[in-house]
Amino acid sequence: QQPVQSPQAVILREGEDAVINCSSSKALYSVHWYRQKHGEAPVFLMILLKGGEQKGHEKISASFNEKKQQSSLYLTASQLSYSGTYFCGTLTGGGNKLTFGTGTQLKVEL
Amino acid sequence: DADVTQTPRNRITKTGKRIMLECSQTKGHDRMYWYRQDPGLGLQLIYYSFDVKDINKGEISDGYSVSRQAQAKFSLSLESAIPNQTALYFCATSEGTRGNTGELFFGEGSRLTVL
């Protein structure tokens, strides 16, 4: 079942912070985060594993709450280059395939 | 050259035609995937393969078939294309261990239009 992302879209001014949430109805083994710029392929940001947290990218970090089956992506001091659509992908217990959310469109303006 | 290469990048075809999208990779990964992207729906898994002899259906496999010709090649076929298969298709690869999947590396995408 597809994870739910919120918000669906957000507009920021350069330098502002944002949080993108991803929640699942199933127990999660790990969560992936990807960013896709318009007309391009998705690019990996980070993986969060059950029982741990892994920071993978500049001023972007994430948390993973196993009990709530949720993950949040934190973008601090946003830059114009952060604009794009952010997807979470969830891996449920016993599964080996990622199920992606519908995405959060983020736009950073001057 | 790209690590994950998809051909063709763009294709326009007619209803009922057979279409094949090809994917090749130089990353040496065993795992390969085909995803479909529609506006507002995110990425939906069509088929995935963990090695040449292991092929599995994803969330939306109806109307599609795949072939894993070698570790480096994974093809997606539409036997009889229909207009609602108009979408952007991505091939991806990853490493993985039992019960987990590593970072996905995506190809540049194949945009298919079915008239």
Image (spheres, helix red, strand yellow):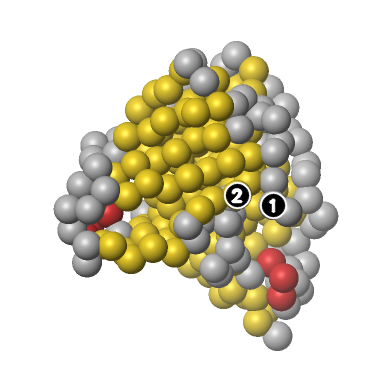
Of residue A91 and residue A51, the one placed in the foreground of this image is A91
Asked where in the image residue A13 lies, by quadrant, the reply is bottom right
Q: Secondary structure at mark 1?
A: loop
Query: Which chain's residue wears label 2?
Result: B
Taking the image as shown, residue B23 lies to the left or right of residue B115, namely right
Instruction: Provide residue A47's location: percent of width, then percent of height.
Output: 67, 37
**Residue lying at the far left of the rendered structure:** B16
State the residue at coordinates (60%, 36%).
B93
Q: Secondary structure at mark 2?
A: strand
Quadrant (top left/top right/bottom left/bottom right) for the C terminus of chain A: bottom right
Quadrant (top left/top right/bottom left/bottom right) for the N terminus of chain A: top left
Mark number displayed over residue B2: 1
Amino acid at pointer 1: Ala
Mark number displayed over residue B5: 2
Taking the image as shown, residue A35 lies to the left or right of residue A6, namely right
User: Eyeballing the image, is A47 above or below B37?
Assistant: above
State the residue at coordinates (65%, 52%).
A43
Q: Is residue A24 visible?
A: no
**Residue lying at the far bottom of the rendered structure:** A110
Of residue A28 and residue B50, the one placed in the foreground of this image is B50
Instruction: Provide residue B111's location: percent of width, then percent of height.
Output: 42, 61
Mark 2 in CB contact with mark 1 (< 8 angstroms): yes
Numbered disc total: 2
3D distance between C-alphas at marks 2 and 1: 6 Å
- Within-10-Å neighbours for mark 2: few <14, some 14–19, many 20+: many
Instruction: Provide residue A9's location: percent of width, then percent of height.
Output: 48, 67
